[in-house]
Image (cartoon, grey):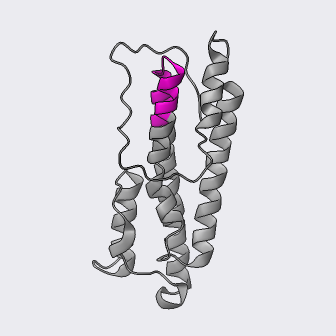
Amino acid sequence: MLPAPDTPYARWAAWLDRFAGGADEPPDELPAMEPEQVGGATAARFAERCAEAMQRRLTHWHAQLARDLEHAMTPLDARQALHAARRRLVAARALAVSELLFAELREALANALDDALAQAQRQLEESAFAGRADGEQFLRAVREVRLDQAPQLDLGAAPFHPPSDARPHRSILLS
């Protein structure tokens, strides 16, 4: 059964679908979701839907980061790719801390996001750029532009574009 159109749940469901697909629109215009107002079953369904949307968003984020790092020819390219990845996390962090969500859901989403980013950071540090002559410089870039720190919105930063002559050196897997 589909939610009735223009209910708080339906508005959030549509927004979460866009968010999961990569949209960066803020949730500010959405209504607050409190379990007392929507009922326990709806609150549980909503929490599950938020978690699924966050997971889909992070899956897309991981894939884009891996593609960007495959094309990183220099440590500077890697830094730019990591900065771009951090900028792409701003919307995910905004959802995780949104006051429109009930406290337990905010905590669960923030913890899941923090855990995913800590895991991605560990994976990059353990396996990134191994076997390359300049691997230590790449590792330094990974440690300087940490993924597991809360991203800050930098409106003046240019988006990352791999060099036109880029050719993949080594695949980096993020799970």
| Residue 103 percent coordinates (x, y) | 60, 77
Residue at 57% from the left image edge and 54% from the top image edge: 150
What span is colored magenta in the figure?
64-81
Residue 23 visible here: yes
**Above or below, comparing residue 65 to residue 4 in the picture:** above
Which quadrant: the N terminus? bottom left
Which quadrant: the C terminus? top right
| Residue 158 percent coordinates (x, y) | 35, 38
**Above or below, comparing residue 59 to residue 144 in the picture:** below
Q: Is residue 138 left or right of residue 164?
A: right
Secondary structure mostly taken by the magenta-highlighted segment of the chain: helix
Q: Is residue 74 left or right of residue 118?
A: left
Q: Is residue 66 left or right of residue 7?
A: right
**Above or below, comparing residue 155 to residue 144 in the picture:** below
The answer to whether residue 71 is magenta is: yes
Residue 2 visible here: no
The image shows a total of numbered marks equal to: 0
Residue at 63% from the left image edge and 69% from the top image edge: 107
